[in-house]
């Protein structure tokens, strides 16, 4: 079985953007008092994932 998406470029864009949003939201939460350090670790991990995914986004679809 395969997971074939006819709109592969759009899927890369969406996944990359959502990972970046997750990273920013985790980073914002990590700055609050009483938030566990694991939230900061999650922000870093999500940022790394977003960066990897961004490498698959076609040049013309990357945000400015």
Image (cartoon, rainbow, N blue to C red):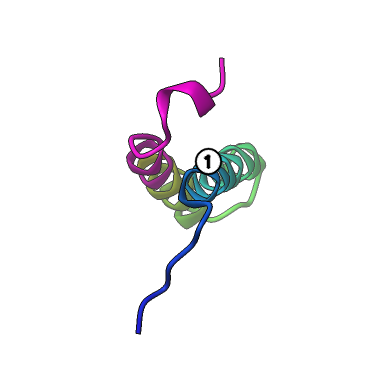
Q: In which quarter of the view is residue 57 placed?
A: top left
Q: Residue furthest bottom?
A: 1
- Please state, as top left, top right, bottom left or bottom right, where the C terminus lies in the image: top right
Please check the rendered image and state whether residue 61 is part of the magenta-colored stretch, yes or no.
yes
Looking at the image, which residue is at 38% across and 47% down? 49
Residue 60, position as x, y percentages in the image? 49, 22
| Residue toward you, 1 or 45 | 1
| Residue toward you, 12 or 33 | 12
Residue 8, position as x, y percentages in the image? 46, 51
Does residue 60 sit above or below 14 in this rendering? above
Write down the residue under mark 1: 13
Does residue 52 sit above or below 63 in this rendering? below
Q: Residue furthest front?
A: 6
Does residue 29 sit above or below 62 in this rendering? below
29 vs 58, left or right, is right
* Span shown in magenta: 49-64
Classed neighbour count for the residue bearing mark 1: other residues with Cα under 10 Å, few (<14), some (14–19), many (≥20): many
Looking at the image, which residue is at 60% across and 52% down? 35
Residue 42, position as x, y percentages in the image? 46, 52
54 vs 19, left or right, is left
| Residue toward you, 16 or 56 | 56
1 vs 9, left or right, is left
Secondary structure beneath dot 1 equals helix
């Amino acid at each position: 079985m395969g997971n074939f998406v006819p709109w592969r470029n759009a899927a890369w864009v969406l996944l990359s953007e959502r990972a970046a949003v997750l990273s920013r939201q985790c980073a914002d939460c990590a700055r609050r008092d009483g938030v566990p350090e694991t939230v900061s670790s999650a922000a870093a991990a999500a940022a790394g994932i977003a960066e990897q995914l961004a490498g698959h986004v076609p040049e013309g679809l990357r945000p400015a």
